[in-house]
Amino acid sequence: MKVVAVTACPTGIAHTYMAADALKKAASKHNITLKVETQGAMGIENTLNSHDISQADKILIVSDIEIDQAARFEGCNWVRIPIEEVLLNVDKVLATHCRK
């Protein structure tokens, strides 16, 4: 399964990157190919392009705030997940939201 994700938190420092790391580490256990865009204090990093988005089976918006450039995901199979859920139980999040 191909998944792309965007992580963002209100301050754009710790939780944005902690959630991205948790997703990356857990993805292989769930047979997921993953690319994560972070929207943090340094701006948008590892930007998801239109090809990444169109090829994704699922898009995870891991954030409690509005993300930048959200219109890219209109009409796609996406879900918003509170950042705390990923930090507390990333395996459950992936098992729940990223099955074919």
Image: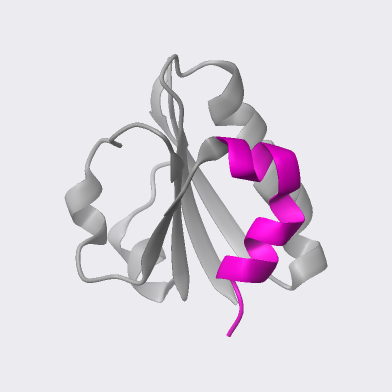
- Is 92 one of the magenta-colored residues? yes
Instruction: Report x, y in % for residue 33.
Output: 63, 66
Instruction: Report x, y in % for residue 60.
Output: 47, 56
Quick check: 48 left or right of 89?
Answer: left
| Residue 99 in the image: above or below residue 16 | below
| Residue 76 in the image: above or below residue 40 | below
Q: Quadrant of the N terminus?
A: bottom right
Instruction: Identify the residue at image location x=41%, y=20%.
Output: 10
| Viewer-side residue, 75 vs 83 | 83
Quick check: 4 left or right of 17?
Answer: left
Numbered range of the magenta stretch: 84-100
Instruction: Identify the residue at image location x=26%, y=59%.
Output: 73
Instruction: Report x, y in % for residue 11.
Output: 44, 14
Quick check: 29 left or right of 98?
Answer: right
- Is 54 one of the magenta-colored residues? no
- Is residue 46 visible in the rendered image? The answer is no
Quick check: 61 left or right of 13?
Answer: left
**Numbered-mark total:** 0
Is most of the magenta stretch helix, strand or loop? helix
Residue 28 falls in image quadrant: bottom right
Instruction: Report x, y in % for residue 95.
Output: 69, 68
